Amino acid sequence: MTRAPTNLSNVRTLLLSYLKDLDPAAVGIVGDPAHRGGYHCGSDRVVANDYSVVESPRDRAGLTIDASALDVGSFTVRSAGRAHDLRSFSVWCVQQCAAGAADTRDIREIIYSPDGKTVRRWDRLKRRSTGDSSHLWHTHFSFFRDSTKAGRDQVPLFRRYLTAIGLLTTTIPEDDMSAQAENEIHQVYAGLFTGGSSMGRTVDPDGPGPEKASNSIVAKLDYVMSRLDGVAAGVTTLTGKDFTDEPAIVAGVLAGLSPQRLSEALKAAGLTPEAIAAAVPPDMARQVVDELTARLSS
């Protein structure tokens, strides 16, 4: 029988842990016994030409006995002096998908209501734009089936939301990268708010030479930049201001600042890619500033 995969069960557990007004019965993965067809069904319940199978090679290749969808019902929670509910949550998630955030790439569609009156659908495949009226009071997430088959972690997007509204502290999960990578990133950025002058040195004196060290530092920017959407969203949500100085956001994340303190640091820092380059050794400064400038202008 269709079952709930661990990765989506983990998302359910996370949301129920922090959104205290959310009824557990309103957070569902597997459709009821009469449900046939769609992402809430596994291989035993799909139908002929099921859209959740035939419209994407990712779904055809990923079909298993597992469901690949999550429904989230109504809730209201107050955090950082503001009220947050299913509608604002849904709009935030859609915005992240539309912006191409890295942790949304496995989401096929979101069916939701931004106002409780109209139903809309964000569809990565651009096949549909609406849904039935039940989505006035619950939001549906479909995940490409290959991501469910692979057991890919879907918690990061929802953790980012909880961070954005202030229910979680902005942190870099310990298992997201190796200790060496974290050490190298800190060596480059750790002194941006403290005026440190020893950043960017090779981590291991007996390790790679200057060229390899420089390439390694720039490569680690891929990791840092992949986290920017969520951090920027969190700062914007909590302060009502749009901070677009991404290097400063990176520095704040790596310094372990809370979103509130980060917003204050951003106003004072005024950092640019050139400012970051000035803080690292000359042999890698040009490479770092070129990389950041290219990313900020893309």
Image (cartoon, rainbow, N blue to C red):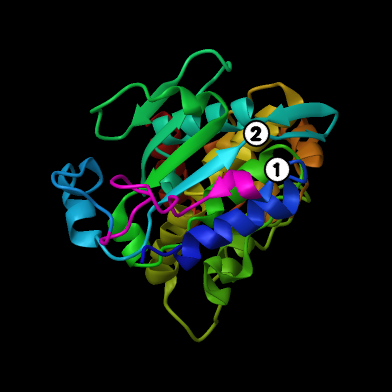
In the image, 261: left or right of 138?
A: right
* Residue 22: image tag: 1
> Magenta span has 10?
no
Magenta stretch, residue numbers: 25-44
In percent of width and height, residue 47 lies at 20, 48
Q: Is residue 168 visible?
A: no
Q: Nearer the viewer, residue 67 or 282?
A: 67
Q: Is tag 2's residue or tag 1's residue first in the polypeptide sequence? A: 1
Q: Are marks 2 and 1 in contact (CB under 8 Å)?
A: yes
Question: In the rendered structure, which amino acid carries the disc numbered 1?
Answer: Leu
Residue at 85% across, 28% down: 81
Q: Which residue is mark 2?
A: 74
Q: Point out the image quarter for the C terminus.
A: top left
In percent of width and height, residue 161 lies at 62, 41
In the image, 136: left or right of 101?
A: right
Q: Residues within 10 Å of mark 2 (few under 14, many from 20)?
A: some
Main secondary structure of the magenta stretch: loop
Question: In the rendered structure, which amino acid carries the disc numbered 2?
Answer: Ser
> Magenta span has 34?
yes
* Residue 280 figure quarter: bottom right
